[in-house]
Structures are given as C-alpha cells and as structure tokens.
Image (spheres, helix red, strand yellow):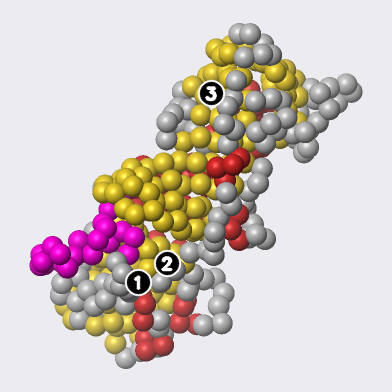
Amino acid sequence: MKLVADQQELAAGVGWVAKGLPHRTSTPVLLGLYFSAGFANTTVAGTDHAMAAEVVLNCQVDAEGTCLVPGRMLAEITKLLPPGPVELTAADDRFVVRSGGAVYSLPLLPVADYPTNTAHRSQAPLVAEPSPAPLVAEPSEGGGDAASSPSPRSAVDAGEFAVAVGQVGVSAARDDVVPALAGINLSFSGDTVELASTDRYRLGIARVELTEPVEAFDVLVPAKTLGELSRAFAADGGQVLLSLADETLLLRNNERSAWVRTLSGPYLPYRRIVPDETPISATVDRIALRDVVKRLSVVADGMTPIWLEYGERSVRVYAGSGDDASGAETLPITGSGDPLTVAFTGQLLLDAINSFATEQLTMSYTGGRKPAVLTGGQSYLHVITPRLLPQ
C-alpha cells in the first residue's frame, strides 16, 4: 500500500478515529487503525467493540492495499508534522511515514486478526443491515428498482442533532453504575426523533425533525459517545443518516461513518416526570440568571442550596445565612401565579441554565417541592428536582 495525503486532512481524520480506540485492551489489534486504500477511495477505521468509526480520505493512491497501524502513535505523529504532503507506505511489516525530511517507521499489526465489521465501506457496510430494513436506511447505490430499496429512510440535520444531543446529555448520569442512566434514549416516531436522558434528579427532552417519517421505535445509546460523534458530524455540516441494525446505531455522511452499540432497554417512563400543569411561571433573562448563580456558587459550595424567592415582578436569588458566607441578588421577571420560594443544588441549576442557548428562560412550577420545568423554546425542555429543605 502506498498513498500521499494532505497533512491537515490526514491528521484530522486519523485523530478522530483514534479517539475511539481503547487505551488498554486484552486484544492488541484493537489498538490499531485499519487502512484500506483503493483507487476509488481510501478509508481509515477503528473500533473498541463498543463503537467504531471510519473516515474517507481524499488522497493520491499509488498502490492499493490494507494494513493495520498503531493508532494513537500514528495520530500523534501526523498531528505534529508540518503542513504539506505526507507519504504513507506499508511494506515488509513496517508502516513508513515521510514528510519532507522526516521519516517515521512503525510496526504493522496483524490485519488478519482485525474484526471484519470495520471493513471499509466499498466492500461492505460498517454494520451489516439485516432484513427487515433498518429504522433509517441509505438510498441504494446506482439506482435500481424503487420497490427493492430499503424503507423507511430518513436523516437529520447534523447541527440540530448535535445541539439536541448536547442539551439532553447534560441530564445523563456521569457514571455507569446504572448503565441506562448514562444513556440517551432516541424515540423515533413519525417525522421526529425525541431525545431524552435522566439521572433521576433532572431530565432533558429535545426533538429533532426527520427528513421523512419512520415507524415508531426506541433505542438507547451511551450519552458520552453519542455526544462526541454528533459533534464530529456537525462539523461536516449537512445531514447525518441514522440506521439501526444488530443492536447498533449507525451514523453516516459522505465523509465519515460510525456505529455505537446500544444499551439494553426499555428506558425509564420519563414522561411521567413532566408535570401536566404548571400554574406558577416566571420568565427571566437567562444570561443574567446564569451570572448570578455563578457568583452565588462561590458561597454555595458543597451542599449549600441556592434559593429563588419569586415575587410579583422580581426574583431574589440568594445563598448562605447566619455566620456562614452569604450573598443575594435580585432580577426582574415576568410571570404569573402565587409567590414561591424554592431551593436548588447550585451545580444542577447552573447545568440546567447552561443547557439552553436562548435569551429568555421560563421556569414553571406546581409548587416549591415539585419538579420545576425550564423552557426556552419549543424543541427542548429541562426538568430539575428542587432541594427538599425546610422552608
């Protein structure tokens, strides 16, 4: 195998795939990046069995072939090379990288032992798609009879999907003690996909439109992995195709593809957490509230709560009392309902506020000891549990 690639494109592609490689494993070949160079295209793939990633490189191919290269080492080398053409050659159990006067030689790993489900896409899909057709499928290549094409098929705007994943991911558990709580549930129905996550103390729900309707189906995916993948696809722009097969969720566009193994379900009945009615509501400047909460968090460290005391036209936000450090600030609001005083854990409140990007934030309540619903638009809401403290 011999090819020439641009240093910046090579470093970006290799670096992205290498991020998903395991740091430690009892299967050494999983530490490698799988190169497949053909005259049609060249791909770089990697996997840790829980997920896989593949990227297409635009490069000059002088000799076709496949090889398996130590991934993280190659990623570091290509990242530090100067801009310009980089020559990659695989021969005699060595992988040689040449850039100007720089020459690096890496040992090749046994490609025959590499998992076949990461074979590059001109030979087979990254994840084999069984019959019946996947939830969301690719258009068939080369035309053909429409009746034989996979159906249904759809996609999402990559940027909108990444934003929704980022918003909802705030509510996912930070550990995998209960694996499902560290995931994001994707509920496909009609022309939308609803994303939801909860760690039992907070809940995020967002919706993204699909390009075409699909039948109802749910899938649960690790939040951290989905967040990293969705950001990469958003950077490419355009749309990202989603499909489900063999307990994996596949994401794909023209430049890259990836799959992530799903978590076992079913997910929690999260809709029960959202109050049916919220007679008390207040709308506040989101940035101003964020800054107040950040300042008060200095005196509300640990388990010290931050209090919101709602009046007719203002909310007093305060923390601490007595001999302890304390602080208080007042912000104007518009709203309706009875006066209310409610307490929140500072970090949970700040996370909730930061998960929005709108200028205004509406906080709605059924009472001071019931979940609060935060909204800033029609496509995303956040539910947060108050601190149950003496009033």
Answer above or below: position of 267 versus 195. Answer: below
Relative side of 139 to 231, left or right: left
Quadrant location of the N terminus in the rendered image: bottom left
| Residue at (51% x, 35% y) in the render | 381
3D distance between C-alphas at marks 1 and 3: 43 Å
The front one of 350 and 278 is 278
Measure the C-alpha gap from mark 3 to mark 2. Answer: 37 Å
Q: Secondary structure at mark 1?
A: loop
Label 2, residues with CA under 10 Å away: few <14, some 14-19, many ≥20: many
Question: Which residue is labeled 3 in the image?
Answer: 362
Q: Amino acid at mark 3?
A: Thr
Say which element carries label 2.
strand
* Mark with earlier residue (1, 2): 1
Closest to the observer: 263 or 297?
Answer: 263
Question: Amino acid type of disc 1?
Answer: Val
Query: Which callout, 3 or 2, points at the residue further toward the start of the chain?
Result: 2
Please name whichever residue, 103 or 385, is drawn nearer the observer in this view of the structure. Answer: 385
Chief secondary structure of the magenta span?
Answer: loop
Report the residue marked by disc 2. 248
Dot 3: element: strand
Task: Check the picture and name the quadrant holding the C terminus.
Answer: top right
1 and 2 marks in contact (CB < 8 Å) = yes
Residue 242 seen in this snapshot: yes
Report the residue marked by disc 1: 127
- Check disc 2 and give the amino acid type: Thr
Is residue 142 rendered magenta in the image? yes
The magenta stretch is 134-156
Q: Residue at x 46, y 78 (%)?
A: 30
| In the displayed structure image, the side of residue 147 where residue 234 appears, left or right | right
